Amino acid sequence: MMRLRAGGIAGVLVALVLCAAPAPALARSGASFDFLFNMDRVSDDNQYFLNVAVSNYGYDRVVLEPVLPRLRYIEADLPVVLFLADECGRPPEYIVDLRARGLSWAVIFNRVDVPYDRLFVGIRNDPGPPYGNAWGHWRRDRRGVRLSDSDISGLVQVQIGARAARMRPYEMARAPGQGRPVAYVVAEERGRPYHGGKKHDESHRGGDRAKEHGHHHDHGDD
């Protein structure tokens, strides 16, 4: 009898733990994506970068918002979804479907027939870390190279950020290695027009404010 009661108590405790555990899918579906479509909802550089990306690609909120809860990491995945959808001429939902099936970005690039060359437009020389190794592998074997998810996500941000900030992709690719994330550079170049942007954490600025780039339109030159 005591054993049955102990087992029953253990079962109740397990049930309580399961009930208390977070449900990632539900949490994501309940997340607010207002900052992607409304500048008044933007509160930091990362949100601002995503807002600019969505705006520049011109996808309607009615089309884009329903598929967002299916992305596990909005900051890393959404720019790649927008980039690939634009490059291959398919709707964002198609790209999200592939990603939601657990496919790597390398496989998805191949599936939608978008070459890695598109990630390196305007980067004709080794940009150094963090993308120097990826650039080197691509230069040596453009057809056989297989990039990691993090490299692809970062290089997509470089391409989107270069256009948004009107910088050369080569200079944008160098910025993270200098302690200046792409989202930070874009917000800096565009004057942080979002609410509270002028009070952004100064820690990224550092002592060296010298700019090593000019304002250029991105035509694939470096």
Image (cartoon, rainbow, N blue to C red):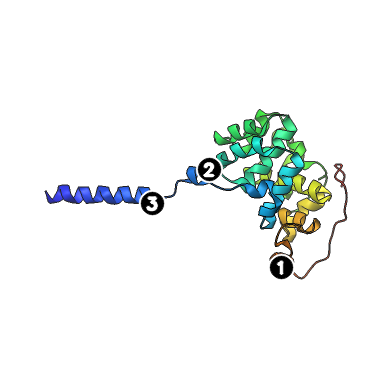
Secondary structure of the residue carrying tag 3 is: helix
Q: Which residue is mark 1?
A: 202
Three-letter amino acid code at the position of disc 2: Ser
Q: Nearer the viewer, mark 3 or mark 1?
A: 3
Q: Residue furthest left?
A: 1
Q: Disc 3 marks which residue?
A: 20
Do we see residue 136 in this rendering? no
The image position of residue 98, as x and y in percent, is 59, 32
Question: Label 3 crowding class (10 Å Cα cut-off): few <14, some 14-19, many 20+?
Answer: few
Please name whichever residue, 142 or 46, is drawn nearer the observer in this view of the structure: 46
Classify 10 Å Cα crowding around label 1: few (below 14), some (14-19), many (20 and above). few
Give amino acid for label 3.
Answer: Ala
Task: Decide which of tag 3 and tag 1 comes sooner along the chain.
Answer: 3
- The picture quadrant where one finds residue 85 is top right
Mark 2: secondary structure: helix
Could you give the CA–CA distance between mark 3 and mark 1, rounded to whole angstroms?
Answer: 38 Å
All told, the count of numbered labels is: 3
| Residue type highlighted by circle 1 | Glu
Give the labeled residue for mark 2.
29
